[in-house]
Image: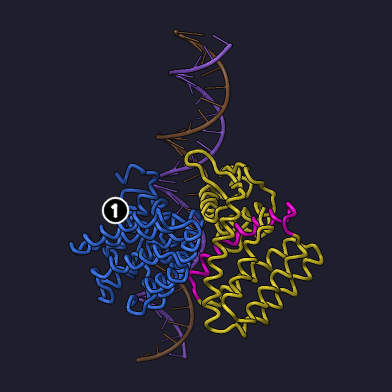
Chain colours: A yellow, B blue, C brown, D purple
Amino acid sequence: MPDLEHRSLPDSVHRLLRNRILNNELPAGTRLVEMSIAAELGVSRSTVRLALTRLADEGLVEISPRRHSTVTRLSHEDIQDACYARYVLEEGAVRAVLAHGTADLVHPLTELVERMEHAARDRDLAAVVDLDTAFHGHLVAAARKPRLAKLFAGMDAQMGAVMRSSLEEQHLDLADMPAMHRDLVDALADGDPSTVADALYRHYLREDYVL
Amino acid sequence: MPDLEHRSLPDSVHRLLRNRILNNELPAGTRLVEMSIAAELGVSRSTVRLALTRLADEGLVEISPRRHSTVTRLSHEDIQDACYARYVLEEGAVRAVLAHGTADLVHPLTELVERMEHAARDRDLAAVVDLDTAFHGHLVAAARKPRLAKLFAGMDAQMGAVMRSSLEEQHLDLADMPAMHRDLVDALADGDPSTVADALYRHYLREDYVL
DNA sequence: TCTTTACCGATTGTCGGCAATCGACAGTCG
DNA sequence: CGACTGTCGATTGCCGACAATCGGTAAAGA
C-alpha cells in the first residue's frame, strides 16, 4: 500500500478509492463493502465509511441505505448532464475572468497545452486527464470566486470518469485533446465573451464528444 | 409531515443544527463542540461529527483540524461570492429552461409569488425565506439538469443566511421580496434569454442587495 | 520583566463492537 | 406447481472508548 499516511486517513482512503474507480480497477456496478475495504487497507470501518460518503457526494458511488454501496454507472444522460453543469460553472467563471482581462492567463495555459501535447504523443492517458483538470482548474481559479471554484472542483472526478469513458469508447481521441484546449486559449486571447462562451460550449457539449 | 422522511440520525442532527444557525440561535463565531452537542441531543459523537461535516460542506460551519468547529462568519466578499455562484447556476438552468419554453412555469411561480406577498405582509421572515427557496428551486428543477439542481440546492442554506443577514442589516426589505420575484416571472414570460439573464443578475447582484 | 519551555486540559481522529435491518433462501400451504 | 412466510446470513447504523494533538498557562531561566 502506497503512502496511506500522508494526510488524514479518510482523505487517503478517499483518494485511493477514487483512483481505483477512475482507472477502472473498480468497474461500474462493483459492490463496495466497508468491512472488506477496511480489512484490505488496514484501517477502521468508520474511516472507509467516511471515504465512501465523500465519493457519494462526488457522484462516483451510490449508497443504498441499509444495503451496500456500488460504483456509479454513468448513463448517456448522466454524461450530458455532468458536462452541462461543468460548462455552466466554467462559463460563469470565465465571464468573471474576462472582466479582469486574460493577459496573465494565456501564457500558463499555453504551457499546459504544450505539456498536454507531449503527453498525448506518448499516449499517456492519465497525464492528459490530469493536465485537463489542471487546465480548467487554473482557468476557473483566475476568476477569484472561491465558491464557484469549489463547486467546479467537486466535479473533477466525474469529468475524469466521463473523459475516460469517452476515450475508451472511441468517441474522443487522445490526440484531439490538446487542440481542443488550444481553441479555448485562442478564444480567451481574443477576449470576446460570446466567442469564449461558444468555444466552451463546443469544448464540453459538441455532439461527438459524449457517448 | 416533514419528518416522515426521517431517514437517518445524522440527517436529523444536521437539519436541527442548520435551523439553529439560520435562526441565529447559534450566531456566527459560535464554537461547536462535538461532545457537548452529542450530550445535549442524546446521540453519539460520531453522529454529530457527520452532521458537522455536512454543515461544513454547505459552508455554514468551518472545521479547523485538531481544534474545534465554529459557525462561519460571512464577510462582505463571502456574500458577493455566494450570490455570484448562485447566479451562475440559476442562469445556466434558466438557459436550459428557455429552450423548452416557459409556459407551464409562469403559473406555479406566480402562485408562489402571491403566497410570498401574503407572508411579507405578515412580516413572516421564515415563510418568505422558505418561499424564496421554493421559487428558485422550482425554477431550476424545470431545467431537468439533476447535477445543476443538486449544486444549486447545496447553496440553499448559505443563501438563506445571506438573506437573513441582508434583511437584518436593513439592506433589503421584506416587502421588496415579492416584487423582485415578480420581475423574474415577467422576464421569464417574455422569454428573451438576455432579458431573463439581466433580471437574474439584478435579482442576485444589484449593489443594494448585499451588505 | 521578558522569553522560553514543559505541562495540562480540552478536543478531535480513529477504532472495534453491538444491535437493527435488508435480501436471499428454504420450507410450507393452497 | 406457484405463492407466501419465517428464518438466517450479510451488511450497515450507531455507539462509547482510547489515543493523538492542539492551545493556553504556569513555571523556570536570563
In the picture, measured across the screen, residue B146 lies left or right of residue A31, that is left
Decide which of B116, B33 is in the foreground and name it: B116
Q: Position of residue A79 (x, y in %)?
A: 60, 54
Decide which of B191, B111 is in the foreground and name it: B191
Q: Quadrant of residue A102?
A: bottom right
- Local packing at callout 1 (Cα closer than 10 Å; few below 14, some 14-19, many 20+) is few
Q: Decide whether residue B167 is among the magenta residues.
A: no
Q: Which residue is mark 1?
A: B40
Q: Position of residue B161 (x, y in %)?
A: 33, 66
Q: Amino acid at mark 1?
A: Glu
Q: Which chain's residue wears label 1? A: B
Q: Position of residue A112 (x, y in %)?
A: 70, 74
Q: Residue, x 38% and y 65% (percent of image)?
A: B158
Dominant secondary structure, magenta: helix
**What span is in magenta?**
A145-172
Above or below, A192 against A177 in this view is below
Q: Residue, x 77% and y 71% (percent of image)?
A: A117
Which residue ends up furthest to the right in the rendered image?
A122
Q: Position of residue C7 (x, y in %)?
A: 42, 69
In the picture, measured across the screen, residue A30 lies left or right of residue A49, that is right
Q: Quadrant of the N terminus of chain A?
A: bottom right
The answer to whether residue B68 of the structure is visible from this angle is no
Q: Residue, x 61% and y 75% (percent of image)?
A: A195
